[in-house]
Image (cartoon, rainbow, N blue to C red):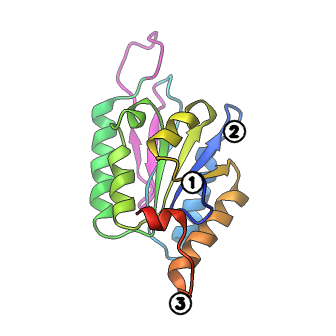
Amino acid sequence: MFDAQCDLAALVYSPHQDPDAILRGFAADLNARGLRVVGMVQAGHCADSSLSAVLLHNGEKLLLAQDLDPAASGCRLDLARLQNAAGRIAETMSHGADLVIINRFGKRERDGRGLAYLIKRALDSDIPVVIAVSDDHFAHWIKFAGGMSVKLRCDRHALDAWWRAVSARGADPVPDQHLTVCEVLK
């Protein structure tokens, strides 16, 4: 079940698309308008030592890669560094946020680890969340989200349209407004 008014959105991307650039630009534009965007967006690649993330509230770049032998293959994500970044995001969220952006939904989040708790914390605080989800992980995302998510194409227009719908709800409530499925189940 999908609801265009839901506070939880998945920016679904395929291998040839760059959700990070879209999310970085989106966050920068919202921050420039005085909104408080919290979270992080991936920079670099998982399979090399360039894996890092940019904190969206202050632009700081954090290294997330493990220090491995350069010949090592596979994802180099350092879980301790990821959890440190998550803690910093949680601390920033505690001071208020208009939107939370999570860089990726992957194996760790699917299993309830990684940055999964930040999604729950944001939604429990009525803060909208957008997360990049690969085509390959979308079925797991739907299970994780209980089907209560908006599926967005990986383009800025889709992201902007979702944000306008979600942010307009809180700006000027209409007395006889019908509740969305996501609002009823919150």
- Distance in Å between CA atoms under marks 2 and 3: 41 Å
- Asked if the stretch drawn in magenta spans residue 11, the answer is no
Instruction: Look at discs 3 and 1 and give the one toward the viewer.
Output: 3
Instruction: Look at discs 2 and 3 and give the one toward the viewer.
Output: 3
Q: What x and y, as percent, mark residue 124?
A: 34, 62
Which of the two labelled residues, at mark 2 and mark 3, occupies the earlier sequence position? 2
Mark 3 sits on what residue? 175
Q: Is residue 17 above or below residue 58?
A: above
> Three-letter amino acid code at disc 1?
Arg
Q: Residues within 10 Å of mark 1 (few under 14, many from 20)?
A: many
> Three-letter amino acid code at disc 3?
Pro
Left or right for 112, reference 24 = left
Which residue is found at the position 43% from the left and 30% from the top?
107
> Three-letter amino acid code at disc 2?
Gln
Mark 2 sits on what residue? 17
Mark 1 sits on what residue? 24
Query: Looking at the image, which is closer to me, 166 or 44?
Result: 166
Which residue is found at the position 58% from the left and 45% from the top?
20
Q: What x and y, as percent, mark residue 66?
A: 36, 25
Q: Residues within 10 Å of mark 2 (few under 14, many from 20)?
A: few
